[in-house]
Amino acid sequence: MAERIQDTKRDYDGANEQSVKGGRDTQAERTLVIGDMHCKEEPILERVDAAIEQLGCGRIVFCGDYVDEWHSNLLTMRDALDALRTWVLKRRADGLTVDLVTGNHDMQYRLRETGPGTHAPLFDEVAHLLDELNVRAATTVGNTLVTHAGVTRSWATDCLDLAEGTDAQTIARQLNSLLDHGQKISLRMLAMAGAGRGGYELPGPLWADRSELAHDPLPGLDQIVGHTPVESIDLWNIPAEDGVRTGARLVFCDTFSLKSNLSPIGDGSMLLVEGTGVRAVTDEELGLTPWPATIWDWMTIHVLPFLG
């Protein structure tokens, strides 16, 4: 049975911070991982800036879904995409490492197919921006895989060559090869959706629900994902088949998402990875206005006046 670390503020604090498998990232490099943004780039990136300044982060990783907020329109979409493009290009020019992975909403624009909330007139604009910013299917932080929704064992067994290895770097390379192939058959493999998200296929790395990933993770692979909204940074320890050891750790980071009535689901916390340790970065730590109040103030100016 998966063990969920429920009290994130306690369990990620100081000496009690949880660990994931280390790799190329050193103790000196702090990586900040950001969950789904969904057209809220402006207020979220302000928080990322505060974390970079106060925590000395050398790398930023975004978990996907940059588009398609509830009640968004072409204007709010273009504003959000402009904000993302400007921020990423400037930060990269300043020497910061910025990596982005593709979300299920983003993939619809590559496929030129409508999905939940897709703005079809922006197919070409969004697809071009994803290419310009080199948005990938996967990346790694140390030996931990970062995708939008996570790699399940059933999907990986059917769609990847596990004989090549199940380490994070090998899995990321294979996922990115599917994206780079560019044909719809390969892109649709990444975008397969299981029953947990209303689909009829195996739960793939852009659509797997948290329940599907926790029930059937690829053994031995630590993963960081967004996609499923959570109240705060959420860590699950998945036992190995012997039931004694930890087989994998899953970290869920989608803390910025909103309900259809535009009320916040999560607290806006972000994930800090330093060496083998991970912990939540909160508004309180950064001295920021709490996320629920921040997003409400932002929406009263940028969203609510334009609702019919």
Image (cartoon, rainbow, N blue to C red):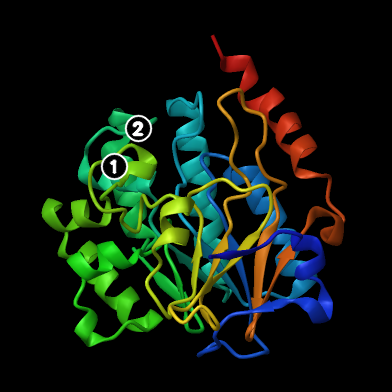
Q: Residues within 10 Å of mark 2 (few under 14, many from 20)?
A: many
The residue beneath circle 1 is 108
Looking at the picture, which amino acid does disc 1 mark?
Gln
> x and y percent of residue 262 in the render?
62, 27
Q: Residue placed at 79% from the left, 35% from the top?
A: 293
**Residue in the foreground of this view, choosing between 11 and 296:** 11
Identify the disc placed on residue 118. Answer: 2
> x and y percent of residue 308 in the render?
54, 9
CA–CA distance in space, label 2 to label 1: 7 Å
Circle 1 — which element?
helix
Q: Residues within 10 Å of mark 1 (few under 14, many from 20)?
A: many
Q: Given contact means CB atoms under 8 Å apart, are the residues at marks 2 and 1 in contact?
A: yes
Question: Dividing the picture into quarters, in which one does residue 256 lie?
Answer: top right
Looking at the picture, which amino acid does disc 2 mark?
Thr
In this orientation, does residue 235 appear?
yes
Question: Dividing the picture into quarters, in which one does residue 95 lie?
Answer: bottom right
- Judge from the rendering whether residue 300 lies leftward or rightward of residue 16; answer left or right: left
> x and y percent of residue 229 in the render?
56, 45
- Judge from the rendering whether residue 85 lies leftward or rightward of residue 32; answer left or right: left
- Judge from the rendering whether residue 284 lies leftward or rightward of residue 215; answer left or right: right
Circle 2 — which element?
loop
Mark before the other along the chain sequence, 2 or 1? 1
From the viewer's perspective, is residue 259 above or below residue 308?
below
> x and y percent of residue 159 in the render?
19, 66
Q: Residue placed at 65% from the left, 39% from the top?
A: 265
